[in-house]
Image (cartoon, rainbow, N blue to C red):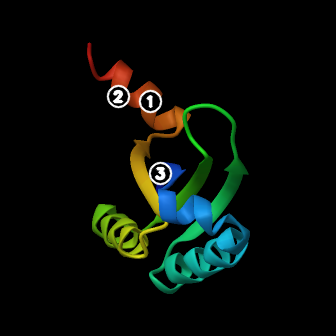
Amino acid sequence: MTTYIVLINWTEQGARNVRESPKRLDAAKKLLGDMGGSFKAFYLTMGECDMVAVVEAPDDAVLARFSLMLATGGNVRTRTLKAFPELAYREIVASLG
C-alpha cells in the first residue's frame, strides 16, 4: 500500500455546511475503504489547511479516483502528497552514490 498525505480545505459550500462535515468524513472513509484503501489518521488543523488526512491506497490511480470523487461533492478541495516511509527515503538517498 502507498501512503499519501491529503491536505484538505473546505470550499465555501463546505464551510456553510460544516455541521455535516463529520457525516461527509464517514462517507469518505467508507468510499476509500470500498476502493481498497483506508484512513490512517485524520486531523482538524489550524493554519493553511482546514484538515489533514493520512491515507493508504493500493496505487496512485485509486487515490486519484478517490480525490476526484471527493471533489464532485463540492465541499472540499484537496492537495495530495505521495509519502515515502523512512526506509524508502534512506534507500533513495543511498542510491545517489
Q: Pick whichever, 38 or 26, lies toward us.
A: 26
Check the image and report above or below for 14 versus 43: below
C-alpha span from label 3 to label 2: 18 Å
Give residue 83's quadrant in the image.
Answer: top left
Where, quadrant-wise, is the C terminus in this rendering? top left
Query: Residue 65 placed where, x, y %?
Result: 32, 72
Residue closest to the far bottom: 34
Amino acid under label 3? Tyr
Q: Pick whichever, 57 or 15, lies toward us.
A: 15
Question: Is 89 displayed left or right of 28 in the figure?
Answer: left
Residue, disc 2: 92
Q: Secondary structure at mark 3?
A: strand
Query: Residue 37 placed where, x, y %?
Result: 51, 72
Residue drawn at 42 percent across, 69 percent down: 74
**Badge 2 local density, few (<14 within 10 Å), some, or many (20+)?**
few
Q: Residues at badges 1 and 2 in contact (C-beta under 8 Å)?
A: yes
Residue, disc 3: 4
Mark 3 or mark 2: which comes first in sequence? Answer: 3
Residue, disc 1: 89
Query: Residue 80 placed where, x, y %?
Result: 40, 49
C-alpha span from label 1 to label 3: 14 Å
Q: Nearer the viewer, mark 1 or mark 3?
A: 3
Amino acid under label 2? Ile
Question: Is 39 displayed left or right of 88 in the figure?
Answer: right
Question: Is 3 displayed left or right of 93 in the figure?
Answer: right
Query: Residue 28 placed where, x, y %?
Result: 56, 75
**Badge 1 local density, few (<14 within 10 Å), some, or many (20+)?**
few
Check the image and report above or below for 86 versus 72: above
